[in-house]
Image: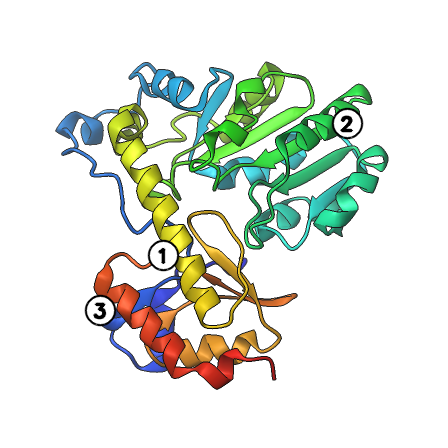
Amino acid sequence: MLEHGGRLRRAAEHYGIALADWMDLSTGISPWAYPVPPVPETAWQRLPEDDDGLEEAAARYYGSAELLAVAGSQPAIQALPAVLPGARVRLLAPGYAEHAHAWRERRPHLIDAAALEDAIDHSDVVVLVQPNNPTGVHFDRDRLLDWHARLARRGGWLVVDEAFADTTPAHSLVPLAGRPGLVVLRSLGKFFGLAGARVGFVFAPTEVRTALAERLGPWTLAGPARWAAHHALADTAWQAAQRARLDAAGARLHRLLQAHGLESCGPALFQYVRLPHAAQVHAAFARRGILLRRFDAPPALRFGLPADEPRWARLEAALADCPNLLKEP
């Protein structure tokens, strides 16, 4: 099992700070969750049904009906190597580690963003996150379309994980779903703040979705999760307000880090900071009950969004308390 953000109980035990006293900025999940209406008893009592309107709501929200509902992106990430052919696999690195873990039996090449252009014509499968997690790197949409076309001409595949793309929907490749050689993954967890519901979608050609469905089996989504997702995807007014709120908070976080000498980048939901002494900074914040996400290759930290003004003040105070630690050693 790989490491992920959100291991708050383990941090509380390690640092001897009560769970309720922590501020978790480690996950990149929106601190403002969609207010799910009360779940009817039938959602608990009956097996999930795929004619409840969820897929239609998802098609309207994302811009394509070429979809398969899954229990978050993770099952699809794990199953795609069994479905997509190709020996020469390239993955963007650093990136979401579950992708490399899933493709490990094909010995994928991990390459940085600058090397992707030259790697396209020597690859059968290219997997990337857009915008990238954790680095925040964002690729121009036309460039992605060019890469997809070059791969597809040779029977190759471009797999794009758009887990953090909801704040910039115009950049999404989902409206092109169904084209040969293109797979796009989406998730409700980040933008909607519903990570616990475990809801995601795969946008891909019919044969890929059919093969995935056969591998994943029936009832991949629980009834209550389908209920929550259906309402969230249909609520356009809440989505617009959430997008504006996240954009403002992301810009605020960038300015705050910059004011304390930290160069950062990222989408609205998080900021990524490369620091050679990231481990020491991570520990210093943890001793103050603030959990960040630490990366070791290269050394870096990811800051999520505080939920309210007291938490913003707490983060700013921690940054102000560590001026020497935040500087280059």
Give the SS element for disc 2. helix
The earlier-in-sequence mark between 1 and 3 is 3
- Near-viewer residue (4 or 130): 130
Neighbour tally class for label 2: few under 14, some 14-19, many 20 plus, Cα within 10 Å: many
Cα separation, mark 1 vs mark 3, equals 18 Å
The earlier-in-sequence mark between 1 and 2 is 2
Residue contact between numbered discs 1 and 2, judged by CB atoms under 8 Å: no
Q: Is residue 304 visible?
A: no
Residue 305: x %, y % from top left: 36, 56
Residue contact between numbered discs 3 and 2, judged by CB atoms under 8 Å: no
Q: Which residue is rendered at x = 74% and y = 23% of the image? A: 149
Q: How is the image coloured?
A: rainbow
Neighbour tally class for label 1: few under 14, some 14-19, many 20 plus, Cα within 10 Å: many
Q: Which residue is rendered at x = 64% and y = 35% of the image? A: 140
Q: Is residue 303 left or right of residue 240?
A: right
Q: Which residue is rendered at x = 58% and y = 54% of the image? A: 135
Cα separation, mark 1 vs mark 2, equals 37 Å
Q: On the image, numbered disc 1 is attached to which residue?
A: 305
Residue 317 falls in image quadrant = bottom left
Residue 303: x %, y % from top left: 44, 61
The earlier-in-sequence mark between 3 and 2 is 3
Q: How many marks?
A: 3
Q: Is residue 21 above or below residue 172?
A: below
Residue 239: x %, y % from top left: 31, 32
Give the SS element for disc 1. loop
**The residue under label 2 is which amino acid type?**
Leu
Residue 205 falls in image quadrant = top right
Neighbour tally class for label 3: few under 14, some 14-19, many 20 plus, Cα within 10 Å: few
Q: Nearer the viewer, mark 1 or mark 2?
A: 1
**The residue under label 1 is which amino acid type?**
Leu
Q: On the image, numbered disc 3 is attached to which residue?
A: 20
Q: On the image, numbered disc 2 is attached to which residue?
A: 151
